[in-house]
Amino acid sequence: MIAERMKMIDASGIRKVFDLAKNMKDPVNLSIGQPDFDIPEVLKEEAIAAIRDGFNRYTVTQGIDELRAGIGGALKEKKVQFEDTLVTSGVSGGLLLAFMTVINPGDEVIVPDPYFVMYKHLVNLVGGVPVFCDTYPDFRMDAGKIAALITPKTKIILVNSPSNPTGAVSDERTMREIAALAREKGLLVISDEIYDSFSYDGPCPSFGAFYDRTLTLNGFSKSLSMTGWRIGYAAGPKEIIKEMTKLQQYTFVCAPSFAQLAAVKGLDVPMEGYIAEYRGKRDLIYEGLKNEFRIVKPEGAFYMFPEAPNGAASEFVRMAIERNLLIIPGNVFSQRDTHFRISYAASSDTIKKGIDILNELARTVKQK
Ligand code: PMP
């Protein structure tokens, strides 16, 4: 009954973790991929008013004008080059439309490893070939590493800064070097910038500022903590946006109407307070773990990717779960199984409990 293509998607890694976790009672949960604050109140009010006012129908496929104008303004402020925009159902929606639009069977897509899980599976789904760019140990994806992977079949370089799961932020020089390589080889860059507002040690550069053949994907799930409202956007060359819009017409149709309206307002909501709080959480967990773990200090997003002291992340995570701490083994995000992902999108109290459990576990493992 099931189509062959579904074999290209494998959810077993994350499922194993959640199977292990299902008997946990009130776990110390450092596995969540969304902020622990709620949508700002003004945006809730805006959405409720939109619904009451009857703004409940389909919108135009490309997204309402006010939102696209706002997104365009924000991109221009960051000097991002683009010709057109499309409002998508989250960055996930944007990724699927983008991959279906630009990847032919057999095309190679260079993907940083560790990677956000969707990249690997969606590239496979559309018949592309993910070619992993190993970024260990510092999680930097640079032009040298990418150049070594380019073949005549390479079509796309995918970049994700700040990164899920490592929290690494690419600097401007690295981006310029990758852009020069992409230009020389005639490649498209797809830049997933969903965590760009969570950048703690300076602003996060946007890839599209350095290369015109960039498809920028971003959204409001994380920055405004509205993961359930499904608003994202794509910006880039007009021939790509045009085809993505055509496909959206026959698939997602449009992003949720009321949420589009609230997102317009969201563009002006100051989030600095939240970001400062997250910087504090980053420092708390990094300082708390750095003596027992080998860790690259994350500069963005709300993840950290330390090395498991026993070198075997799945086993280490199993032991953490026995101690009521939920974290995710690195092999969910990587071809390797040596590291694990911590999300510090949690209360300080939960983070402190997690630090204590992890340090105790590291000491136990090292004694063996
Ligand atoms: N890209 C990355 C790197 C992510 O971590 C996520 C969410 N976990 C997404 C895209 C998808 O986000 P959304 O579809 O909610 O916009």
Image (cartoon, helix red, strand yellow):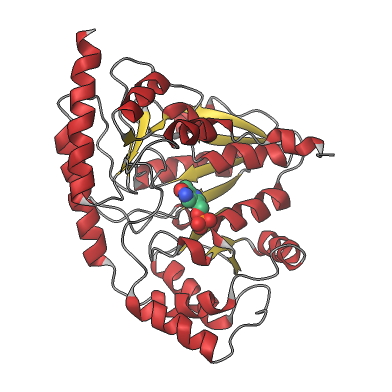
Q: Residue furthest top?
A: 368
Q: In the rendered view of the protein, which quadrant contains the C terminus? A: top left
Q: In the rendered view of the protein, which quadrant contains the N terminus? A: top right
The answer to whether any part of residue 157 appears in the image is no
User: Which quadrant of the figure has residue 55?
Assistant: bottom right
User: Which quadrant of the figure has residue 193?
Assistant: bottom left
**Does 364 sit above or below residue 148?**
above
Q: Position of residue 140 (x, y in %)?
A: 38, 34
Q: Position of residue 201 (x, y in %)?
A: 23, 50
* Front residue of this view, candidates 64 and 215: 64
Q: Position of residue 314 (x, y in %)?
A: 42, 22
The residue located at (48%, 26%) in the rendering is: 331
The answer to whether any part of residue 160 appears in the image is yes
Direction from residue 312 to residue 179 in the image, left or right: right
Q: Residue furthest right?
A: 1
The residue located at (51%, 35%) in the rendering is: 14
The residue located at (44%, 55%) in the rendering is: 194
The residue located at (31%, 62%) in the rendering is: 37
Direction from residue 172 to residue 112 in the image, left or right: right
Direction from residue 367 to residue 219 in the image, left or right: right
**Does 276 sit above or below residue 119?**
below
User: Which quadrant of the figure has residue 223?
Assistant: bottom left
* Front residue of this view, candidates 74 and 197: 197
Count the labels in the image: 0
Q: Position of residue 219 (x, y in %)?
A: 48, 62
